Image: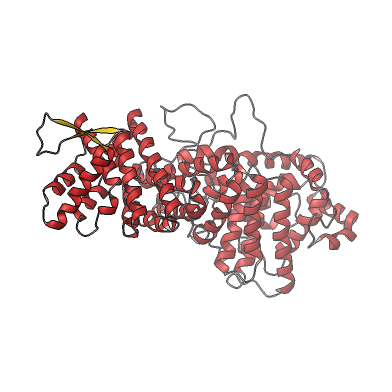
Amino acid sequence: MGLELLKYPEMEEDNVLNFTDSEIVSHVKDALTSVLSGDNNSYNQLVGVMHHSKHLAPDEVALLETTLKALAGAVSSIDITHHDSLLSAIFSMSMWNYGPHVADALAELIVSLAISNGKYLDLCLRMLVSNFTPPPYFLDKLKLSRGLERKGQVLSRVHAAFKKIADYVPLAPLRLLTVVLQGMPTIYHKDRAILIYVENMLKLESGEIGELVGSTMLMAVVDRLIELDVEIGWDAILQDDFSKGIFEMELEDVDDIDECSEPDVGEFRLSRKSLAGNSIAELLDNLLVLTFEHLESCEREGRLAKVFETLLQSFQITVLSAYKSKFTQFVIFYACALDPENCGMSFATMLVELFVQDSQPQPTRMSAVSYLASYLSRAKFLSASFICSMLKRLVDWCLEYCETHNGDLNPNAHRVFYSGCQAIMYVLCFRMKAFVNVPRLRLQLLMPLEQVLKHKLNPLKVCLPSVVEEFSQTGKSCFSFHQLSRAFGGLERLDTFFPFDPCLLKRCDSFIRPMFVFWSMVKPTYDDAYDDDEDDGSSDDELVRDHVNENEDMMNGWVGKSFDEQGIDMDEFDCELQKMSITPKTTSGHKFGGRMPSRIRPSTSPESL
């Protein structure tokens, strides 16, 4: 097939010649080899064509496309030393500046260079990665349909080029990893540039070379989320009234609602005094949503279980060790929500295993049990039976700890133990309703817990006062010491937090909210339960003693054993627990969960700081 090639500038402007493809390639090769003899005229004209970029006339577009195709056929004649100016011009080109035909020709040239000589591999990969983001002038065009169309055209060609190079150069994906990680924009780049770059990283994770680069890409994304997360200081989030407990903070009255917004009763907004106008928070919010959408696509493609393995690894390496991460942990929360039976249970199991392992460092164990407590309390998608089984493991561990440690109260020496006790009480503040009316559970879970709480180590004097006080109210029908709890709590308080408190990021919250248990959803049910207890004429102590007398021989045989070992049908058991759902039924005047406050803040109140 013949191509019509416009003459170079020394040719007459109105004269057009017809060349075959091979003749064009030969012409370009002559221009390249002429440099070796000292004749740079044709070569310089060739380089000049590469500098054509914006606002090209149709004939200039044709010339550029034809020249790029010819260079792709003449890569064997390109020398990295003698033709450095040409290579520099090629590698500085951006596909965002051209239409699909020129972009195709440019991608073909880059692939040909990459597979022709190992010297060009990294240069070609860097050039392709540089096309992850558009030139600064193009960022505003991404708001328009035409800009989005160009984005799709560019990125599809970039990722197709990666695949072609990887097919011919097996080591290319490993080199690509380094190039991508080195090229990641800093958190101070324009937010849209970072978003597009991360979008491409996630595209690599799910793409044809994802088997080779996917896990590293995903872990790098989580690392960047953490970097943004720590840039948002707690001072911008914590409320002014430091006297309030963690439960009061979540139930704070609604104020400062945007009058222009839709009147969604169930929606909760960022505090105007906390994260409003915080550019880092807004960027993190958008990146989290981008990650959530990627996890949704993984779930649709049946890849979520494999991706979740990477998330678990990343969580242990990056998130778990980050000091009071505020938002990044919701990535793994959302993955668990998408697949509760596998991901949801695996996450909790991993946390409890970290906690009970004596070989783990103390900070890791304390952080793990804090995550576990918050997760079991907030995850709406977990079954009651599974939550109960996790609590039993914690209670059994604490009870065994008490049996081997009979010393006096010493917060510093027993911090892991106190963290476990606090985690159990926190979860029961949310979930007690599901367990309190099941006699077998009261014996297996609540009565051993009472032994722990009455031990000489006296966890009620060390755990957070707000948790102890709320637990005493929640469990007053189960424990005989509730009348003393108000005087307890707070001796050398634990430095802990509950990482899955309500998400303060506006867009992120819209994904998390349907799977999330808010305190307002369970708090009223406890008040109702207290009224029922007062009406039946039985004291709390009598209720507990009744169950002890009926089952005193069963008690010792159950403690320390799993539900399966005890012969409990978990499906039947879970069905019974679900009848006592903690989520109140929707009434005609209220949407999901009731109206949530606009100034909800995390549970890291000064008492825990």
Q: Quadrant of the N terminus?
A: top left
- Residue extending farthest to the top is 588
| Residue at screen point 80% across, 45% down | 573
**Quarter where residue 407 is shown:** bottom right
- Residue extending farthest to the bottom is 407
In the image, taking residue 375 as reference, residue 608 lies left or right, namely left
- Residue 302 visible in the current orientation: yes
Q: Which is more toward the observer, 139 or 97?
A: 97
Q: Which is more toward the observer, 270 or 13?
A: 13
Looking at the image, is 559 positioned above or below residue 66? Answer: below
Look at the image and name its color scheme.
secondary structure
Looking at the image, is 266 positioned above or below residue 86? Answer: above
Q: Which is more toward the observer, 589 or 465?
A: 589
Task: Indicate the position of residue 572 as horizontal and vertical percent values.
Answer: 81, 43
- How many numbered marks appear? 0
Task: Indicate the position of residue 156 as horizontal and vertical percent values.
Answer: 40, 39
